[in-house]
Amino acid sequence: IKLVAFALSFLTLGGLLYLFFKNFGKNNKDFISYILIPLLLSKCFVEYSTSGLENGLSQLLLAAFFLYFLKNSIRKQSIFLLGTLSSLVFLNRHDQILFCFLPICYTLIVRRNFWQDLRALFITYIPVFIWFAFSIFYYASIFPDTYYTKVTGGIDIEILIPMALNYFLVFVERDLNSFFIILLSILLSAQLF
């Protein structure tokens, strides 16, 4: 079973890289230089991508969502497709819906068909509502156990801040490549805006 899970993780990672290559790999040198090498040098990315089925699938679904959002003009976008992709993102991992929230809000505002688009969005979220109903019935709560463990853990902020700082220092110590990739990404994106 571990081998199947590992193979599926690599399959979703391959799908992610394929989506990047298909959309940004017109110049193979740029694709290799700016996307493939940094991702493969990032210990965090490789471990995260292969550490569970939902992680690789989250990356693939988010890549599909953002590639569709960025490659099409807002007026030509299908709110139904954006909603479906974001619904799948949510069903895969609840917390990752936050990545889709602002692009969908932006699309709703810019398209100016608010009520019609909201109705289409509601239809795409029917599986999410079904999941909520099942979750309340079966688990007696709407959120996963990890939410209650992490959010209501009862740890004081005076303890959490030093723990967060230690977590950051360990991250820099163990995966300096990823730290510089994140830092460079922030600097490059700041230049775009």
Image (cartoon, rainbow, N blue to C red):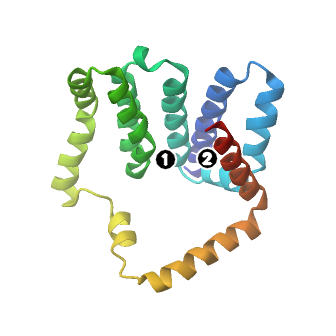
Residue 39's spot in the image, x, y percent? Answer: 72, 44
Left or right: 188 in relation to 52: right
Say which residue label 1 marks.
54
Mark 2: which amino acid? Answer: Phe
Instruction: Kindly state the secondary structure of the residue where label 2 is placed.
Output: helix
Question: Can I make out residue 38 in this image?
Answer: yes
- The residue at the point 42 percent across, 14 percent down is 76
Quarter of the image containing the C terminus?
Answer: top right
Residue 121's spot in the image, x, y percent? Answer: 27, 29
Question: Can I make out residue 50 in this image?
Answer: no
Residue 48's spot in the image, x, y percent? Answer: 61, 53
Instruction: Kindly state the secondary structure of the residue where label 1 is placed.
Output: helix
Compared to residue 3, the image places residue 24 above or below, namely above
**Label 2 near label 1: C-beta < 8 Å?**
no
- How far, Cα to Cα, is label 1 from label 2? 12 Å
Question: Residue 32 is drawn in which quadrant?
Answer: top right
Between 2 and 147, which is closer to the camera in this rendering? 147
Q: Residues within 10 Å of mark 1 (few under 14, many from 20)?
A: some
Between 150 and 100, which is closer to the camera in this rendering? 100
Query: Of circles 1 and 2, which is in front?
Result: 1
Left or right: 134 in relation to 91: left
Q: Given the current orientation, which residue lies at the most extreme top position? A: 76
- The residue at the point 37 percent across, 43 percent down is 90
Say which residue label 2 marks.
6
